[in-house]
Amino acid sequence: MKISDERISHLSHILLDELWRGDLVDCPDEGRALDVAKASLARFFSVDDEVDALVRGMLTRQQKIVGSREWQILYDKYFRAEMEKRRW
């Protein structure tokens, strides 16, 4: 899933505001905390793109016809399996 830098920044601010409001974290350097939150969110959202590229490559090597019923079934199966491997 492609998410813009602006959206990731916005989500980072919301995340940190909620953590501070709930008194779940106390960080003396707000800028550093935002940088870490942004990097974490960017990595989280980039996993889908990585898995999509990997699965499409697998299906291309198997010479499956893009968009066919077989391709879609295998795509879904492989995608779920690869996402399971990357569970945090």
Image (cartoon, rainbow, N blue to C red):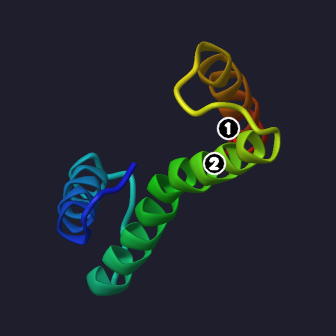
Question: Any mark on residue 83, and which?
Answer: 1
Q: Tell me what residue is drawn at x 34 percent, y 82 percent.
A: 28
Q: In the rendered view, would you say 76 is above or below 45? A: above
The picture places residue 80, in percent across and down from the top left corner, at 67, 28
The picture places residue 21, in percent across and down from the top left corner, at 20, 51
Kindly identify the amino acid type of the residue bearing the numbered disc 2.
Val
User: Based on the displayed image, in which of its 4 quarters is residue 8 positioned?
Assistant: bottom left
Question: Any mark on residue 66, and which?
Answer: none
Q: In the rendered view, would you say 37 is above or below 82? A: below
Q: Are marks 1 and 2 in contact (CB under 8 Å)?
A: yes
- Name the quadrant of the C terminus: top right
Q: In the rendered view, would you say 59 is above or below 67? A: below
> The residue tagged with tag 2: helix, strand or loop?
helix
> The residue tagged with tag 1: helix, strand or loop?
helix
Query: In the image shown, does 63 or 25 lie closer to the viewer?
Result: 63
The picture places residue 15, in percent across and down from the top left corner, at 28, 54
Tell me which numbered mark, 1 or 2, is placed earlier along the sequence.
2
Q: Tell me what residue is drawn at x 80 percent, y 47 percent.
A: 61
The picture places residue 56, in percent across and down from the top left corner, at 64, 45
Kindly identify the amino acid type of the residue bearing the numbered disc 1.
Met
Looking at the image, is mark 1 or mark 2 nearer the viewer? 2
Q: Is residue 77 left or right of residue 28?
A: right
Give the CA distance from mark 1 to mark 2.
7 Å
Residue matched to label 2: 51
Q: Tell me what residue is drawn at x 44 percent, y 75 percent.
A: 36
